[in-house]
Image (cartoon, helix red, strand yellow):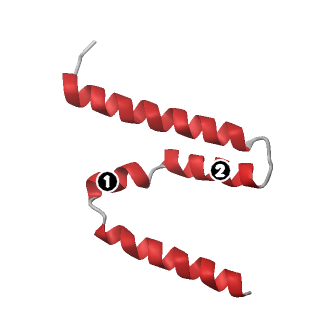
Amino acid sequence: MNSKKYFWGLVIVVLSLFKFIPEDIMKYIVNYQVVMILVGAYFLVKKKKHGWIFLCVGVYLYITNYVWEKFAAIYGSIDF
C-alpha cells in the first residue's frame, strides 16, 4: 500500500512539472512514439518478448519523425 502512495505522488509531481517545460520540448517528450517506447520498456522489465516489438517500433517511429522534421527544417518543403 505504501509503494502505491509513492507512485501516485511521483506521477502528480511529474505531471505538474509539465507546465514548466516549453512546448517546443514537450512535443518530443509527450507523443505516441514515446508511449510505445515506455510500453515496450515495461514489457521488457516484465520479461515479455513482445516488449522488443513495441520498443523497436517506437524507436523507429521516433527517429524517423525527428529526422524528417529536421530534414524539412533544413531543406524546406520539397514538392514531388
Label 1 crowding class (10 Å Cα cut-off): few <14, some 14-19, many 20+? few
Q: What residue lies at 28% left-to-right and 57% top-to-bottom?
A: 23
Distance, label 1 to label 2, CA atoms, is 22 Å
Residue 17 against residue 43 in the figure, above or below: below
Amino acid tagged 2: Ala
Judge from the rendering whether residue 54 lies leftward or rightward of residue 22; answer left or right: right
Left or right: residue 64 compared with residue 51: left
How far across and how far down the image is residue 77, in percent? Answer: 21, 23
Q: Which mark is residue 62?
A: none
In x, y percent, where is residue 52?
70, 39
Splitting the image into 4 quarters, where does residue 17 fall?
bottom left
For image coordinates 44% across by 72% down, the residue present is: 15
**Quadrant (top left, top right, bottom left, bottom right) of the C terminus:** top left
Among all residues in the image, which is located at the extreme top?
80
Looking at the rendered image, the quarter that the N terminus falls into is bottom right
Disc 2 element:
helix
Identified by mark 1, the residue type is Ile
Q: Position of residue 47 (x, y in %)?
A: 80, 50
Q: Which residue is mark 1?
A: 25
Label 2 crowd bin: few (<14), some (14–19), many (20+), radius 10 Å: some
Residue drawn where x is 73% and y is 48% of the image: 44
Left or right, 79 with respect to 58, comes to left
Q: Is residue 16 above or below residue 67?
A: below
Q: Write the residue at 32% across / 70% down.
A: 19
Classify residue 16 by image quadrant. bottom left
Q: Position of residue 68 (x, y in %)?
A: 35, 28
Helix, strand or loop for disc 1? helix
Q: Which mark is residue 41?
A: 2
Count the numbered circles shown: 2
Vertical relation: 36 (above or below) 12: above
